[in-house]
Amino acid sequence: MPSPQGSAAGPGARDRVEQRLRRGARPAPTNPHPPAKTSRALRTAIIGGGPGGLYTAALLKRLAPGREVTVYERNAPDDTFGFGVVLSDETLGGIEHADPVVHEALKAHFVRWDDIDIVHRGIRHTSRGHRFAALGRRRLLGILHDRCRDLGVDLRFRAEAPPPERLARTHDLVVAADGVHSAVREAHRDVFRPHVTPHRCRYIWLAADFAFDAFRFEIAETEHGVMQLHGYPYAPDASTVIVEMREEVWRAAGFDALDEAESTARCAKVFADALGGRPLRSNNSAWTTFRTVVNERWSHGNVVLLGDAAHTAHFSIGSGTKLAVEDALALAACLEEQPTLRAALGAYEEERRPVVASTQRAARASLEWFEDLDRYLDQPPRRFAFNLLTRSRRVTHGNLRLRDAGFTDSVEREFGCPPGTPPMFTPFRLRGLTLRNRVVVSAMDMYSADDGVPGDFHLVHLGARALGGAALVMTEMVCVSAEGRITPGCTGLYTGRQGGAWRRITDFVHDSAPGTAIGVQLGHSGRKGSTRLMWEGMDEPLPDGNWPLVAPSPLPYRPGSQTPRELTRAQLTDVRQQFRAAAERAARAGFDLLELHCAHGYLLSGFLSPLTNHRTDAYGGSLERRLRFPLEVFDAVREVWPAERPMTVRVSATDWAEGGTSGEEAVRIAGAFAAHGADAIDVSTGQVVAEERPEFGRSYQTPYADRIRHEAGVPVIAVGAISSWDDVNSLILAGRADLCALGRPHLYDPHWTLHAAAEQGYDGPGAPWPAPYRAGSRPPRTGRTDAPRPRLTLHGPRQDG
C-alpha cells in the first residue's frame, strides 16, 4: 500500500527541475566530450530500463538535449516483474511539474479510487478518502519508452551493458538503475558496502481479470497459518494480487513443492471469496522473499546508484517506483546546480538519503506488521482495521480523521472513547490508581541534586509538569545508595533527609495538581556510575573523587571507564536490601507508583543482558538465571510497597548490538516481571553497551512495546521519539501501547498535554486546566486580524466616457 504522505522528491527537487525546464535547455556545446569534471554529464550511460532508469534518461535529455544518453536493458521492452504500479498524488505531482507530457500520457490510463477495504473474519471495513492512482506496469514502461524516443534517448533492449568500469572510462556519468540484484553494486561492493536483509515472508505477484473497487487487504486464517492478500485495480478490467505469508506457513501449506501454475490456482482457491471465484493469472511469477537493501555509499567516481540498486522499501507501502522517480528528479536537479560531478553526486546523496531512510523505516514497520499479523488477529474488528492502516506510523489517527471521520469515529466508539474525547484522554487503571489520561512525563535525569537531596529545582521541574496536564509524572532515576549514583548530582532515597525532600514535592503535586499522579523510579547505576554531569561529559569518569563501582561482571562500560567489581553473594543481599529500604522511604514520601529501573545498562539491566553478564554462578548464563537477581529485587520491593499502589518495570527490549537481548527474550523478561506482580512494563531500548547501533526514528521504540503488549499480555508504556499528540492517539487507538511516555516534548513545553487538549478542541475531565491557569486555555492572539480586505483593484488608468 503506498504511503499517502511524503513529497515526490527531496526538498525542492521537483521545483528546481521545473524551473530549469521553464528556462529552456541549453544548446549543446561545441565540444561533445567535455572534461569529466563538469556536472552536466553530457555523455551518460544508464544501466537498467525500469521506471527509474527511463525517467532519469528522459529528464536528463530534456534538460540538455545535447546530452548523449544511452539506456541498456537486458530484457525485452515488455518484460516486467509484476502487473500494476500504484502512484500517490505526491509522486504524480512531481512528474507533472517535471514533464507534463509524461503526466498527460499517464493520466489517460490511470485507474483512480479512494477506498481501502480490510476484510478479516468475514467482516469488511472500509476507510475512504485515500486517493490512489494506478496503471499497468507495461503501460508505464511503454509511456516512458515513447517519451525517451521522442527526446532522442538511445534505448538498447536485450542488450547487456558493458562492464561498469569500461562505461565509467568512456562516459561522464554512469547511472546504475539495475534493480535489487544490481550487478554494478556487486561489482563495487567494497565501495558501496551494501547491507542486504532478507525478511520472513514469502510473496508472489499475480493478477486477476477484473477490477477491485478498492485497495483490498484480505486475511485468511488457514489450517497452516495466516495468509494475506494485497489487491488493487490497475486497469478497468484488471487487478494486481499479491499473496503473502510467513516462510513456515508457506512450507506447511506445500507451496514450496508447487510449480507456478499450481501455486496460482492454490492462491485463487484460498482467496476465492475476495476473487468471487474467479481465477488468477501469472507472468513468470515466482515466490520470493523481500530483501531490504541499504548502501553505505551511493556513488563511486562517476558511477551512481539509483532506485532499488541503492535502496528498497517493502511493497506494502508502494514505494519502489515512487523512490526511483524521486531519485531521478533529485539527481537531475543536482547535476544542473552543482559545478562538478563530484559535488552533484554528493548533493544528490545528501538530499535523498534522509528521505529514503525515513521511507525505509516506515516500510520496515509495515513489513514487520504483516510478518507478525497473527499477533493482532483477536483485536476487535474496527481496531484491527485501524491498526493495519496505521502500521507504518506514517498514516496516523489525525490523517484518517481528515480523510474519513466516520470510520475514525467508529473505531473510537469501539475503543470506548466518550463523544468528543480523543483516545489519549481516556482513563487507564493500574491496580488502585486510575490515571485520567494516557500521557506520562518520562523519567529524565536532571543531575541537579545536592548530596542526593532534591531541591527547589526538582520542585519546580516536576511541579510544572504536574500542572501541565499529564496523568503521571515520573521522577528521574532515584538511586538506592550513594555508590549507586550515576553522577554526584543524582537524587537518592537512601537517607531520611532525602525522603523528606521528596515528600515536599509529592505534597505539592497532590495539593496543587489534584488528579495528577507522581511516580518514583528506583535504580542503581552499576558499572555506569561515578561519572561527570551530563553537560560536563556524558559517561566520562570524574576527574577526582571517584567511588568504587559494582556490576554483575567486571566489565568497564567503555574504554577509559572504571572497571567495576563483580558483586559477591553478600553484596547482592546488601543491594537487595538497599532497594527495599528505598521503596519503604518512597511509600512514606507519598509516591503513587514505583518503577524499577532494569534498563539502559544500569545494575539490574546489567544482569539481564548477555553482553554485560558473564557470571558462571546461579545469577548468570541462561535467561532464567540472568533474571534471578532482578526478580529477587522486584519481589523485595513489592513486599514493602503498598499493595494498592502499582509497580512498573523499565526494560531495554534490545541492546542494539549483536549477541544482546533478543526480541523473544524481551517478551520473556516482561512476562517474568508480570508473573511476579508488575502492573505494566515501560519499554525502552539500548544504552546497555557503548558499541550499540540504534535505529533512530520517529516512535522507533514502539514496535518493541507493541510486541510485549501482545505476546506477554501485559500493559505497556511506550517511549522513544513520540513527539506529537497525533502519535499518542494513534498508538493508543491501534492497541500498540496503553500509556505513552514523552520526555523532550515536556522539556520544550511543560504544558504539552494541556496544549494538546486545546489544539484538539477537547475540554473534559481527561485534561483539566488548573484554576489559576484557565485564562490560558486558549492560545493568545498574535497579531491584528480585523484589517479591512481590499475591495477593488484598478489595472491601468481609468477611462471616463
Image (cartoon, grey):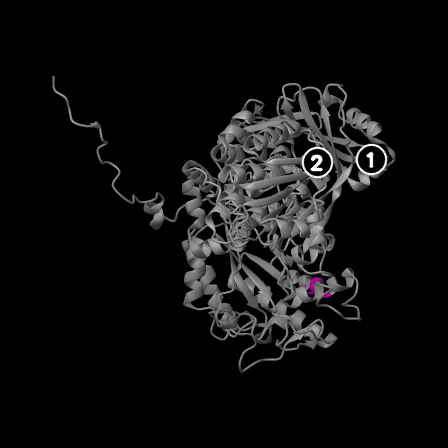
Is 144 in the magenta? no
Q: Identify the residue position indicated by label 2 in the image.
A: 377
Residue 170 drawn at (x, y percent): 63, 50
Q: Is residue 158 visible?
A: yes
Q: Nearer the viewer, mark 2 or mark 1?
A: 1
Neighbour tally class for label 2: few under 14, some 14-19, many 20 plus, Cα within 10 Å = some
Magenta segment main secondary structure: helix
Instruction: Give the residue furthest to the left.
Output: 801
Tell me which amino acid carries mark 1. His
Residue 224: which numbered mark, if any? Answer: 1
Q: Is residue 737 visible?
A: no
Secondary structure of the residue carrying numbered label 2: loop
Query: Which residue sits at x=63%, y=76%?
Result: 549
Residue 614 drawn at (x, y percent): 75, 70
Q: CA distance from mark 2 to mark 1?
A: 15 Å
Instruction: Give the residue furthest to the front.
Output: 30
